[in-house]
Amino acid sequence: MNIASVIVDVAVRQTDRPFDYSIPDMWREVIQPGMRVIVPFGPRHVQGFVLSVKEEPESRKLKPIVEPMDIVPVLNEELLMLADWLTKESLCFKISALQVMLPAAMKAKYSKHIRTTGEAPLSPQMQTFLNGREEAPWEEASEAGLLPDVRKGVKDGSLDVIYAVRSKGRKKTVRMVKCVLPEAKLQEVIQSMPKNAIKQKEALQTFCGKEGEWLPLHETGISSAVARAIIQKEYVTEKQEEVYRDPLAGRTFTPDQPLLLTDIQQKAINPILEKIHEAAAQPFLLHGVTGSGKTEIYLQSISEVLAKGKEAIVLVPEISLTPQMTDRFKKRFGSEVAVLHSGLSTGEKYDEWRKISRKEVKVVVGARSAVFAPFENIGLIIIDEEHETSYKQEENPRYHARDVAIRRAQFYSCPVILGSATPSLESYARAQKGVYTLLTLDQRVNDRPLPTVDIIDMREELREGNRSMFSRDLFEKIKDRIEKGEQAVLFLNKRGYSSFIMCRDCGFVPECPNCDVSMTYHRHRHQLKCHYCGHEDTAPDKCPECQSEHIRHFGTGTQKVEEELLKLLPEARIIRMDVDTTGTKGAHERLLKQFGNKEADILLGTQMIAKGLDFPDITLVGVLSADTMLHLPDFRASEKTFQLLTQVSGRAGRHQLPGEVVIQTYTPEHYSIQLAADQHYGAFYEQEMMTRKMGGYPPFYYLALITVSHEEAIVASAEAAKIVANIKPELSPAAVILGPVASPISRINNRYRWQCLIKYKREPKLGETLKHVLEHYAKQGKSNGLMVSVDIHPYVLM
Ligand SMILES: Nc1ncnc2c1ncn2[C@@H]1O[C@H](COP(=O)(O)OP(=O)(O)OP(=O)(O)O)[C@@H](O)[C@H]1O
Ligand SMILES: [Zn+2]
Ligand SMILES: [Zn+2]
């Protein structure tokens, strides 16, 4: 093959297609599709991905590939096809689709150098600057104010500008040493060494009885100076050995055995096992209440897959990718497991990825991007907590891991398990239609009861003179748990604070008259605004419902909760988990371990404690503020509230001791709170589907969000209007276009943002139309400062 089609690492629309390069003779056997290569592009060298290779009679004049960056392909054929699909589905650049599949360490790092050519004399300035060096970094010349001289040098032929491309990640190596002397000879040498060579003698002693064995130098205790000496004397030889950075170093896992499944679990797993044996691509929705033993079903399904010599991918939301969760997989499958999450360093991620790529592991447990694990014989993909919105990537390529998983599973003819106690409406609706097979676990393991839930009306508390953030009921229960030596989890819903206003006396929250979403409060203008349709109002100083003056937007943080709790209960031992206390590496794990060891009575935290925790002595869960998310300007607000309340409640009473839950709220009558307390998913589903149907939202309609931004608000709004005018004729009359309106976050980095939301059912021309829009603006892009983005199936409408 003498020609390669390459996608170059230049993300603009004009380059969003393969370019042909000739393959130099010496690499004709080497270069294959899926490899990264360095190619010339304009004056520079850039990274590129080979999509295909072909043989052509040498008539075209093509630039040659500079060199390959890999010796084996890093993307297999399936992943290359997947990138194609991803580009079409999410309207992204091909290069972004290719790069998202690889660890960050494999992204190209570019550097620029100046180098002497020796073909013409250097200017005196350059001579002084280079001071005998052949090469210097471009930045250094730039800082020295020498760029004009560099330019002259390039012109007169004395200098070259060199563009270098490297991978960011480095393989880690350790220095290994081995004694080359036979045992007897070694003893002889030690004996004959001069008395003062104590260190060298000691060093050689280490090799006694280790003939022919390679030892890691750092484990021998030999200093590098001494090592150098005995290597020089040719007693010892050395080599560099590649090692993996082990993110779990120092942790041990006691292997565990599969549990005997309960009848309910058995009934749920059977259809999965059947599809594994048939090798059939079938998505399952595993709807199991909290503590119903979903994880055990995952584990046993994976065992079956491994027994067939295939591989499995398990996706877990970042936030619940806790040590507790990963341990369960490590215990069952030991060194067959690789773990990928954002807590790993770039190097550690790279190493885990290479283990997968080299087929040294069979199971990957990881966050969203692990869906691209480079396995080639996938037998099962599992998405735990499938309703989590973090499975959608909010930057290009804007993909949803669920869609990618189902796509890959089709290719490999294998089942997908989507698991959740609170499935997304979209998935449950698909299961109702039979697109996914529904499996239900409606009871906790061994008939442990679900916790009892009390809803506390915080308006009532206020009326009766309790101004604290703890209701009397919750406070009494916390005290009781501390006395009994049991544990409590206090959950503060941080998301959504400070964006809406609420009456503290009656719970009234101003809503948009047209949209059924709460209005967003703008403090600087004291205004309320709907971010779906643009409706505006001044913020009331008195509650329109009850005339109370206690209507304001309020907020509180975990730290404040901790302080107040300590004032009331000085003896309470509290572990606080939020972004502040978990910022450092391993902090998350350490805090949970302390809690598990019962070094604290109360675990106080935000979203990050809502999921995955399984501690036997948690008998109380308190939700301090159930409403905060309810009033976000988001049609999924009720769904998110229901899911979160159900999840947190599920942390209580999972083992022998029964659990209790207290939910504090200002809107106790809201159906998502009522039904979460009843733990009645079915009823919530019915009610919420009705709301979505009336509002014309998913799963009844699909959405596409167009966002336009510019430094001047008027330009952004005018362009948004133009876009709407342009696409309208391309869509059927059934499609609805909302807006343009200012985005909820109306300015980011001094750019004003406007958006329009398209609701549609079937619009075959939509993808093409939106792509044209993107292309149109990409062409003008830089000159007029407009930025346009398109999010198909958006989850963040801000
Ligand atoms: N068949 C079984 N026999 C005995 N114990 C089991 C069985 N299956 C699961 N368990 C135990 O029950 C508890 C709950 O199970 P698991 O954590 O798998 O539930 P889950 O549905 O994944 O929970 P959640 O979604 O709430 O995190 C765990 O402590 C688990 O070890
Ligand atoms: Zn009121
Ligand atoms: Zn509105």
Image: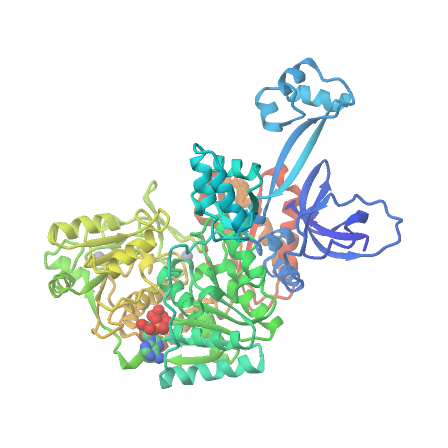
Q: Is residue 535 above or below residue 225?
A: below
Direction from residue 603 to residue 256 in the image, left or right? right
Residue 472 image-quadrant placement = bottom left
Query: Residue at 52% of width from left, 35% of height from top?
Result: 229
Q: Residue 346, percent across and down?
A: 50, 48
At horizontal 56% and vertical 74% (from top left) the residue drawn is 309
Compared across the picture, whether 78 is left or right of 598 comes to right
* Percent coordinates x, y for residue 631 in the rendering: 33, 58
What residue is shown at x 62% (from left), y 28% (from top)? 138
Q: Is residue 475 visible?
A: yes
Residue 87 screen position, x and y as percent: 63, 58
Q: How many marks?
A: 0
Which residue appears farthest toward the top when viewing the image? 124
Front-lying residue, 780 or 321: 321
Say which quadrant the N terminus sits in: bottom right
Q: Quadrant of residue 634?
A: bottom left
Front in this rendered view, residue 548 or 640:
640
Q: How is the image coloured?
A: rainbow
**Residue nearest the observer in this picture, 28 or 639:** 28
Q: Quadrant of ligand 3?
A: bottom left
Instruction: Say whether residue 174 is visible.
Output: no
Q: Is residue 285 above or below residue 177?
A: below
Q: Position of residue 638 (x, y in %)?
A: 36, 65
